[in-house]
């Protein structure tokens, strides 16, 4: 049995049967890519390499508007619709006490506004070759599959674009999102921080709580008590701050701001990465209060995800996936509010 000694770059030596099928397979593979005998350490080291079964991928921000259930999503609009229009109605008039045979009975009137928003397609594609499929069959590991990972990357790219459209729309295409609706009241946080700043990192716990309470009161005042928030969204940095920053023990039993807001105000508080530096020309962070009711707002998704027929050309297959989105409709603008500069 022909035994040959190989020396690696690190000085280690190994004795190998050069007639074994395994060695000959690696030697053949090395020749195919131009590695000759004097470079045997290359393919031999690869033979000894441990290939991890786990695939390490980048971590992406959670898509909370699209997948997190933070807003109602409407998927019932026809796929071919390019616009959707809705009416917001209100009324005037008040009933009054009358006398017998009264002829001054008041009349009520109904009025309203009509709003139209665009719906656009979002798409991308991925291409794989016949050789990609051959490699995948040889690997036999779905985690390392070229085709599967390209498909997942294309799906993720579409989902991330939908999340952006639901959050901030795209003014160039006539799409409005949840966080940039011009009809929603927007207020700068009070300048009660160090040096008259508005950022929460410079404020006491009591001042931060006052910002939140003021936003709640403003929503109720401007709507004459009709609107009351159920949810609060805040960027991840300030979420971490209120989760750890405690109120004083004398007035608030030493609870953190987050726990106090959830317990006393009844708000469900969620962190939302999109809100970091997303207001006032993308320079300031903010928090959002809103009522989650489907009567108040909804995300418009006529097509959540649609794969199209593969296009085969030159031993390669192109796959297109599409979605259709119209951003987020805010039917009752006073059911939301933005507080910026935190």
Image (tube, rainbow, N blue to C red):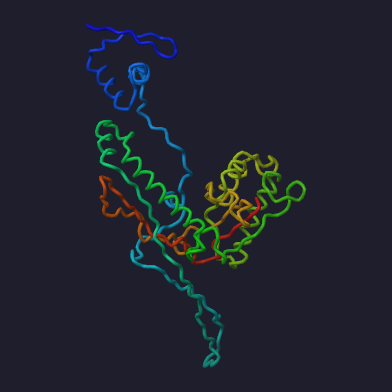
How many labels sit on residues? 0
Compared to 114, does 302 lie above or below? above
Instruction: Give the camera-side residue of 63 and 21.
Output: 21
Q: Residue at x 30, y 24 (%)?
A: 31
Compared to 17, does 82 lie above or below? below
Asked whether, in this view, residue 118 is left or right of residue 29, the answer is right
Q: Position of residue 129 (x, y in %)?
A: 28, 42
Q: Residue at x 59, y 43 (%)?
A: 237
Q: Residue at x 35, y 50 (%)?
A: 125
Compared to 324, does 54 lie above or below? above
Asked whether, in this view, residue 110 is left or right of residue 338, the answer is left
Instruction: Give the camera-side residue of 102 and 47.
Output: 47
Q: Position of residue 134 (x, y in %)?
A: 25, 36
Q: Position of residue 26 (x, y in %)?
A: 28, 21
Instruction: Give the camera-side residue of 59 and 144.
Output: 144
Instruction: Give the camera-side residue of 80 and 69.
Output: 80
Quadrant holding the N terminus: top left
Q: Quadrant of residue 279?
A: bottom right
Q: Position of residue 281 (x, y in %)?
A: 62, 57
Q: Quadrant of residue 85?
A: bottom left
Asked whether, in this view, residue 246 is left or right of residue 60, the answer is right
Q: Residue furthest right?
A: 195
């Amino acid at each position: 049995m022909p035994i040959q000694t190989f020396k690696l770059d690190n000085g280690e030596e190994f004795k190998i049967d050069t007639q074994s099928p395994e060695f000959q397979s690696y030697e053949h593979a090395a020749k195919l890519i131009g590695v000759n005998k004097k470079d045997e350490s290359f393919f031999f080291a690869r033979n000894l390499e441990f290939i991890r079964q786990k695939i390490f991928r980048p971590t992406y921000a959670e898509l909370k508007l699209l997948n997190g259930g933070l807003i109602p999503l409407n998927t019932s609009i026809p796929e071919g619709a390019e616009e959707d229009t809705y009416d917001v109605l209100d009324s005037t008039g008040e009933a009054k006490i009358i006398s017998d045979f009264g002829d001054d009975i008041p009349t009520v009137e109904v009025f309203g506004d009509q709003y139209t928003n665009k719906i656009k397609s979002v798409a991308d594609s991925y291409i794989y070759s016949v050789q990609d499929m051959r490699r995948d069959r040889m690997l036999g590991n779905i985690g390392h599959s070229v085709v599967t990972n390209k498909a997942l990357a294309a799906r993720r790219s579409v989902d991330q674009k939908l999340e952006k459209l639901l959050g901030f729309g795209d003014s160039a295409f006539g799409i409005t999102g949840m966080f940039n609706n011009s009809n929603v009241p927007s207020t700068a946080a009070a300048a009660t921080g160090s040096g008259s700043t508005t950022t929460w990192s410079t404020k006491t716990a009591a001042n931060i709580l006052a910002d939140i309470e003021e936003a709640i009161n403003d929503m109720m005042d401007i709507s004459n008590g009709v609107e009351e928030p159920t949810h609060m969204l805040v960027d991840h940095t300030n979420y971490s701050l209120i989760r750890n920053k405690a109120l004083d023990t004398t007035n608030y039993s030493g609870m953190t701001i987050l726990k106090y807001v959830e317990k006393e105000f009844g708000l469900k508080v969620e962190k939302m990465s999109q809100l970091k530096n997303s207001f006032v020309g993308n320079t300031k962070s903010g928090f959002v209060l809103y009522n989650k009711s489907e009567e108040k707002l909804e995300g418009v998704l006529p097509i959540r995800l649609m794969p199209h027929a593969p296009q085969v050309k030159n031993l390669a297959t192109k796959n297109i996936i599409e979605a259709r989105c119209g951003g987020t409709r805010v039917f009752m603008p006073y059911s939301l509010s933005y507080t910026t500069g935190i």
